[in-house]
Image: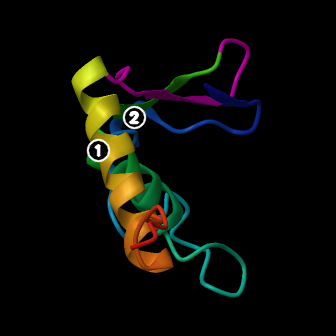
Amino acid sequence: HVIDHGPGIPGPLRAKIFERFFRTDKSRDRETGGSGLGLAIVAGLVEAHNGTVDAVETPGGGATFRITLPLADDKSLRELARRISAEANSTTGGSPQPHTQT
């Protein structure tokens, strides 16, 4: 959870804030505010990891952003370890081979 106690986000706009270039305050431009990409990037990263992100009203005022990511299962962790090992071997020229005398 990321919580702020600012002005909050009106209910009808909460679904739109994760769209690219969307800004809740139309009077702001790039010089006085963001480009409207930050939350779209967050949503993209979270979705790429099979998670969810949403915004709800913070009790007492403001907005709370909730990010939920799934836990990795054993199969996913083994695959990740395999990919990391393969990448490390490809950048170092492979695993060291034992030296044998003939």
Tag 2's secondary structure?
strand
Label 2 sits on residue: 53
Tell me, yes or no, if residue 22 can be seen here.
no
Determine the residue positioned at 29% across, 19% down.
74
For this view, does 46 lie left or right of residue 76? right
Please tell me how crowded label 2 is: few (under 14), some (14-19), or many (20+) other residues with Cα within 10 Å. Answer: some
Q: Extreme front residue here?
A: 102
Tag 1's secondary structure?
helix
First in sequence, mark 1 or 2: give its number: 1
Tell me, yes or no, if residue 20 can be seen here.
yes
Which is nearer the eye, 71 or 15?
Answer: 71
Q: Where does the image place residue 23, in percent across and percent down from the top left? A: 48, 64
Q: CA distance from mark 1 to mark 2?
A: 8 Å
Determine the residue positioned at 31% across, 46% down.
82
Q: Where does the image place residue 59, in percent across and percent down from the top left? A: 67, 12
Determine the residue positioned at 52% across, 63% down.
38
Amino acid type shown at disc 2: Val
Determine the residue positioned at 38% across, 66% down.
87
Which is nearer the eye, 49 or 55?
Answer: 49
Which is nearer the eye, 59 or 2?
Answer: 2
Contact, mark 1 vs mark 2 (Cβ under 8 Å): yes
Please tell me how crowded label 1 is: few (under 14), some (14-19), or many (20+) other residues with Cα within 10 Å. Answer: some
Q: Is residue 64 magenta?
A: yes
Count all numbered tags in the image, as a single digit.
2
State which quarter of the image contains the N terminus.
top right
Q: Where does the image place residue 13, in percent across and percent down from the top left? A: 38, 44
